[in-house]
Amino acid sequence: MAAPIITLTTDFGVRDPFVAIMKGVILGICRDARLVDVTHEVAPCDVAEACLSLESSVDFFPPGTIHLAVVDPGVGSGRRGIALRAGEQYFVGPDNGLFSFAISGSDWTAVSLERDALRRPAVSRTFHGRDIFAPAAAYLAAGVPLERFGPPVTDPERLIWPACRLEGGELVGEVIGSDRFGNLLTNVRADDLDLLGTPDRLVVSVSGRDLGGPVACYADGPTAAPSPIIGSSGRLEIFANRTSARALLGVASGDPVRVRRAG
């Protein structure tokens, strides 16, 4: 049997020992676990950014992978900890919308992490990643059934992603995040563009500035000028060749994006 895989996504960074501590807890329970870092550079407390990182990553892991995510501004409060199975993947972390993409359909089951025997004996009010979530992920990897962790959850928290819409012959969406290169992620997906026609006959505008149609690859964009592209996650992105579109355009999450037919 293949060794279980646990991914880790946090806003802890790598300067402090927090990530290593969580890995130590996991390996103390399930020594055979293979640990994969998705990212630890999520902006502090930015649940939406962490959700986008996970959304773009999980489909590339084999069935049975356990995704441990800790971006937890509500640590120590009354918010729940949850574990869930969606399709053939598992997720563990705070119930604050981190796993919204995983529960967008109907094929999921979630439980509240309440069983004392499946957490560390002493639970800190400031480090649930160490004391609740890392043990839960490790016990799942060791074969403990999901249902043993606590009672069912039927109403997990969800992030409300704005949907793009057709308006007067245009697709209207918005910026929903950015990556370390300054590429702007939008809520417009490649499938949405099909409503307007072929990509080479489209014009994308951001905050009223026309950028032309999507290019095929980053190198096709003019140097230091913003251009649209369909990114690897299937979302429409705005990038700038060899610089940051975020800095160049001065836009942020919530700023409008429009797509129309050329001419």
Image: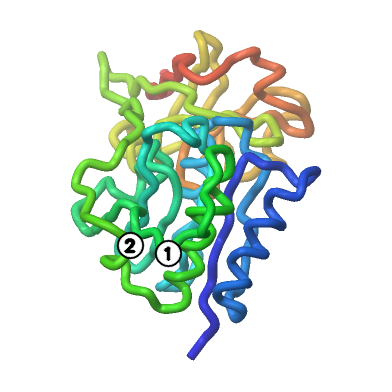
Which residue lies at the image location 68% right of the left edge and 52% below the top edge? 19
Residue 57 visible in the snapshot: no
| Among the 4 quarters of the image, the one containing residue 91 | bottom left
Which residue lies at the image location 32% right of the left edge and 20% below the top edge? 170
Element type at mark 2: loop
Which residue lies at the image location 52% right of the left edge and 59% below the top edge? 120
Left or right: residue 195 compared with residue 184: left
- Work out how far the residue at label 2 is from the one at label 1, CA to CA, in angstroms: 7 Å
Q: Residue furthest bottom?
A: 1
Residue 163 visible in the snapshot: yes
Return the residue at label 2: 149
Viewer-closest of 30 and 41: 30
Which residue lies at the image location 19% right of the left edge and 53% below the top edge? 106
Element type at mark 1: helix
Viewer-closest of 156 and 118: 118
Above or below residue 243? Residue 206 is: above
Tell me, yes or no, whether the two marked residues, 2 and 1, touch with CB atoms within 8 Å: yes
| Among the 4 quarters of the image, the one containing residue 165 | top left
Viewer-closest of 57 and 171: 57
Mark 1 surroundings: few (<14), some (14-19) or many (≥20) residues within 10 A: many
Residue 118: mark: 1
